[in-house]
Amino acid sequence: MTRVVCCQLEPRFGALEENCAAAVAAVREAVAAGADVVVLPELVTCGYVFASAEEVAALAIGLDHPVFTRWAEAAGGAVVVAGFAERAEDGRLHNSAALVDASGVRAVYRKAHRWDREQLLFAAGDAPPPVVETAHGRIGVVICYDLGFPEWPRTAALAGADLLAVPTNWPRGPRPEGQPPLETAVAMAAARANIMAVACCDRTGTERGQEFSGGSVIVGADGWVVATAGDGDRASADLDLTASRDKRYTELAHLLGDRRPELYGALTVTDR
């Protein structure tokens, strides 16, 4: 079994060093409690509600920033997936997530589907979700809004992901009393449609008037929720990630074998 932990934090906007220290401490605490995979929120190093690209530029970091070494040291034998504002080598700014283990940064994913004003602040990523072979299974990475595009988790599943790690910043919106964030249903659908575990790590708090859901959720490969953060600071679950490798729904129904790619051409039509 693989223990997956989503550490639900409340980054303070603009407080880069404070947020980095809090993220490292969260990883250390989770690993000490037995975590094999630790997922942190989207843009955990800096906060989310930017007023301008200039603010992003002031808080964006490159892969030479010491937080990545500190995450690697804190990880020990675990894997960490965490969001950050990235200043790429070409100078472009990205909403990114790094997958880190004790050896260092194994992969960086740049958010391809930018939510709302992110389109004014960040350059879009142009690569598919990375899927990394780790000591705890094959882990894919997307960020928040990406999960709402079914092609993207399917791309990770086709690349062999056992677990899709999803740093998120889900804004709190209207919902019926007692209901979880609607994004929980999206995570469940992605897991069920791909027979792939999904771990969404949300953030908490209010930033510049925007309230966040605190809706971290872990979904098994069968599509059912196995853990939520509720009012706490983490969601934790022990998962059999090998369950993601058997793509049969029944003896005859096979998720990947029953695909009809020759019929899916309309999905790539862009003049609409």
Image (cartoon, grey):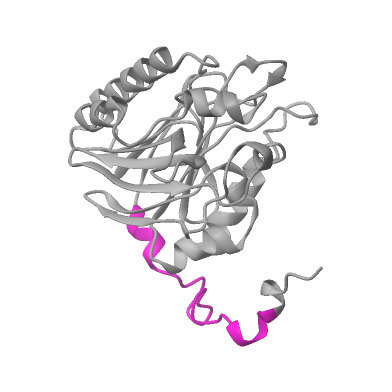
Q: Main secondary structure of the magenta part?
A: loop
Residue 100 coordinates in the image, percent (x, y) = 29, 40
- In the rendered image, the residue lying farthest to the bottom is 262
Residue 51 coordinates in the image, percent (x, y) = 67, 24
Numbered-mark total: 0
Residue 215 coordinates in the image, percent (x, y) = 59, 30
Please say if 211 is above or below 153: above
Within the image, what quadrant is residue 225 found in? Answer: top right
Within the image, what quadrant is residue 152 found in? Answer: bottom right
Rendered residue at 63%/25% (across/down)? 50
70 to the left or right of 99: left
206 to the left or right of 18: right
Rendered residue at 38%/57% (across/down)? 162
Q: Quadrant of the C terminus?
A: bottom right
Q: Nearer the viewer, residue 59 or 230?
A: 59
Q: Nearer the viewer, residue 28 or 267?
A: 267
Please say if 180 is above or below 206: below
**121 within the magenta span:** no
> Does residue 81 appear in the picture of this structure?
yes
Q: Nearer the viewer, residue 226 or 166?
A: 166
Which stretch appears magenta? 241-265
Rendered residue at 70%/40% (across/down)? 182
> Does residue 8 appear in the picture of this structure?
no
Rendered residue at 53%/47% (across/down)? 111
Please say if 119 is above or below 174: below
Residue 190 coordinates in the image, percent (x, y) = 57, 55
